[in-house]
Image: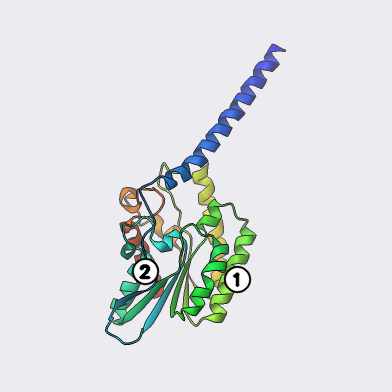
């Protein structure tokens, strides 16, 4: 009887320890993000970049998504990847670029449907980048729900705009130490699974898919330089790397 009681105590002790560990590991991810020195960036509704003396815009670029497209982690919006892309476009095409960024930190695919699509359609864009899904992953959104939201986004963008649309896959986020096991493995797996959905839909709609997840693996050499202080969002240097990868994909 004493032996059975001892085994039960050990069993429940292990269960309590694991429960405490999993709760703490999960809690610390979002506690660190919420208490980091990284803050939302001030951003204008519209930027004119390049040959601003022109009377009318030669090229309109619209960015859709979440905090990654908003440039969170950089010190200024001018260090975000959409702004850097607009600069590259203005330089290489020798024209004025109108940049309108409708992304909102923290949103999921459903909020792009309800809050960003109408703005994107009204902007009459020539180029659109779409990067959404990381908050769906961390929010535990069912993959089929995410897929339906993404289809709605692509249906509207393809049918109601004449823009060249670039689909950006989700990055594998979080520097070593931010995500404790097994969450580091879990979120990496989920990111890969969501990217399979995104890549498949990009193929279905015959749109360019930009693979950040795998492209970054061979390019990020220094995590201290790549990540911002919250250990989740890229720094200015990180976004420069993103902009390079994305812009190179424009001309594949």
Query: Could you tell whether 113 is left or right of 237 in the image?
Result: right
- Whole-number angstrom distance, CA of label 2 to CA of label 1: 27 Å
Query: Residue 214: percent from the left, percent from the top?
Result: 44, 58
Residue 159 placement (x, y as % from top left): 57, 80
Q: Earlier in the sequence, mark 2 or mark 1?
A: 2
Check disc 1 and report its element: helix, strand or loop: helix
Q: Specify the farthest residue to the right.
A: 1
Q: Answer above or below: position of 175 versus 12.
A: below
Question: Would you say residue 128 is visible in this rendering?
Answer: yes
Total label count? 2
In the image, what residue occupies the spot 37% across and 59% down? 41
- Colour pattern: rainbow
Relative to 63, say whether 95 is above or below: below
The N terminus is located in which quarter?
Answer: top right
Residue displayed at 36% across by 55% down: 73
Point out which mark residue 152 bears.
1
In the picture, measured across the screen, residue 164 lies left or right of residue 95, that is right
**Residue at numbered disc 2:** 44
Label ID, residue 38? none
């Amino acid at each position: 009887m004493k032996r059975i009681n001892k085994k039960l105590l050990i069993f429940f002790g292990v269960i309590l320890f694991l429960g405490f560990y999993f709760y703490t590991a999960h809690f610390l991810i979002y506690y660190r993000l919420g208490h980091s020195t990284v803050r939302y960036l001030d951003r204008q509704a519209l930027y004119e970049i390049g040959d601003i003396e022109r009377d009318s815009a030669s090229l309109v670029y619209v960015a859709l998504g979440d905090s990654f497209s908003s440039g969170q982690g950089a010190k200024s919006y001018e260090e975000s990847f959409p702004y850097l892309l607009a600069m590259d476009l203005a330089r290489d095409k020798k024209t004025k670029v109108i940049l309108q960024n409708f992304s909102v930190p923290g949103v999921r695919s459903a909020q792009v449907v309800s809050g960003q699509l109408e703005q994107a359609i009204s902007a009459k864009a020539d180029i659109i980048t779409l990067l959404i899904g990381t908050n769906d992953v961390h929010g535990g959104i069912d993959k089929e729900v995410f897929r339906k939201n993404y289809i709605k986004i692509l249906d509207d963008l393809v049918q109601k705009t004449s823009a060249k649309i670039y689909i950006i896959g989700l990055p594998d986020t979080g520097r070593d130490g931010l995500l404790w096991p097994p969450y580091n493995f879990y979120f990496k797996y989920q990111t890969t699974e969501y990217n399979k959905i995104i890549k498949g839909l990009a193929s279905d709609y015959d749109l360019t898919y930009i693979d950040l997840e795998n492209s970054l693996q061979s390019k990020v050499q220094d995590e201290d330089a790549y990540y911002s202080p919250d250990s989740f969002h890229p720094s200015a240097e990180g976004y420069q790397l993103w902009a390079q990868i994305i812009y190179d994909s424009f001309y594949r």
